[in-house]
């Protein structure tokens, strides 16, 4: 039996927008009425941790109330035909809830908390709040398990390794403006086909052939699925 091709997806905020999760790039740098630098930076945490805890508690409650969209479900269905890896810039769990089994979160996970004293102490909290006074086993305040601006991206090395081994690379719903995630395309081998799904205009690296599907995630993934099955699966039968 022929080995499944490795399909690597880089997903961004546009992937979850149809599920009702707002993107801060679409609201002038405000994220649910908050200045993003106030709620997504170490300086903001040091200045007003209570505001940041409240902000992410609100995001968690919102996440509990939404569902994966057809784009998430379409990617999960591709696991029948391909070895699918999702590298996501999103902090929600909608890929997993749709059924995807290999998901790397570059920017952390909303449903987890971690110790402020020891970053290796990470706790599953689901959709529960983190409150002032909630502490890890070492006695330090818990914080959201989110990679804030200015912090290193612990999963980046793993993401690079997966990108370099891609047979097919797909970009969905990301402006390719946020680094280091936006730089992943540079690690994809030059012979590998690259597809971009986004209804907007996205800055693309020159010298790279990219097939563009100018649609939102749900519609675009359905179109892409048909293309991939025709080109890589049905053709080989």
Image (cartoon, rainbow, N blue to C red):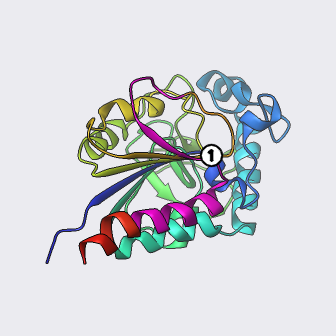
Residue at point 46% right, 25% down?
Answer: 205
Most distant residue in the right direction: 33
Residue at point 30% right, 37% down?
Answer: 157
Residue at point 35% right, 63% down?
Answer: 231
Image quadrant where residue 129 sits: bottom right
Can residue 48 be seen in this snapshot?
A: no
Tell me: residue 3, above or below residue 213: below
> How would you rate the neighbour count of disc 1 (Cα within 10 Å): few for under 14, some for 14-19, many for 20 or more?
many
Which residue is at the front of the view, 39 or 211? 211
Residue 181 location in percent, x, y?
A: 46, 34
Report the quarter where the C terminus lies.
Answer: bottom left
Query: What stretch of residues is rendered in magenta?
Result: 204-229
Can residue 102 be seen in this snapshot?
A: yes
Which residue is at the front of the view, 85 or 35? 85
Image quadrant where residue 180 sits: top left
Most distant residue in the left direction: 1
Residue 150 location in percent, x, y?
A: 52, 22
Q: Report if residue 207 lies within the magenta region.
A: yes
Q: Report if residue 219 lies within the magenta region.
A: yes
Image quadrant where residue 20 sits: bottom right
Left or right for 212, reference 64: left
């Amino acid at each position: 039996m022929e080995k499944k091709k490795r399909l690597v997806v880089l997903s961004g905020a546009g992937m979850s927008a149809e599920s009702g999760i707002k993107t801060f790039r679409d609201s002038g740098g405000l994220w649910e009425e908050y200045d993003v630098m106030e709620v997504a930076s170490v300086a903001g945490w040091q200045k007003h941790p209570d505001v940041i805890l409240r902000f992410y508690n609100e995001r968690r409650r919102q996440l509990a109330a939404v569902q994966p969209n057809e784009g998430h479900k379409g990617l999960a269905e591709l696991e029948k035909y391909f070895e699918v890896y999702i590298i996501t810039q999103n902090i929600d769990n909608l890929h997993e809830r749709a059924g995807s089994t290999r998901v790397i979160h570059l920017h952390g996970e909303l449903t987890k908390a971690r110790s402020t004293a020891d970053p290796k102490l990470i706790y599953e909290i689901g959709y529960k709040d983190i409150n002032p006074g909630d502490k890890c086993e070492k006695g330090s305040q818990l914080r959201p398990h989110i990679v804030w601006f200015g912090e290193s991206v612990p999963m980046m090395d793993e993401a690079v390794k997966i990108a370099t081994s891609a047979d097919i690379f797909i970009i969905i719903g990301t402006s390719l403006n946020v680094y280091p995630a936006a730089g992943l395309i540079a690690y994809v081998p030059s012979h590998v086909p690259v597809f971009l799904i986004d209804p907007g205009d996205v800055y693309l690296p020159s010298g790279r052939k990219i097939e563009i599907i100018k649609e939102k995630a749900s519609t675009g993934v359905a179109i892409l699925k048909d293309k991939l099955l025709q080109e890589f699966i049905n053709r080989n039968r």
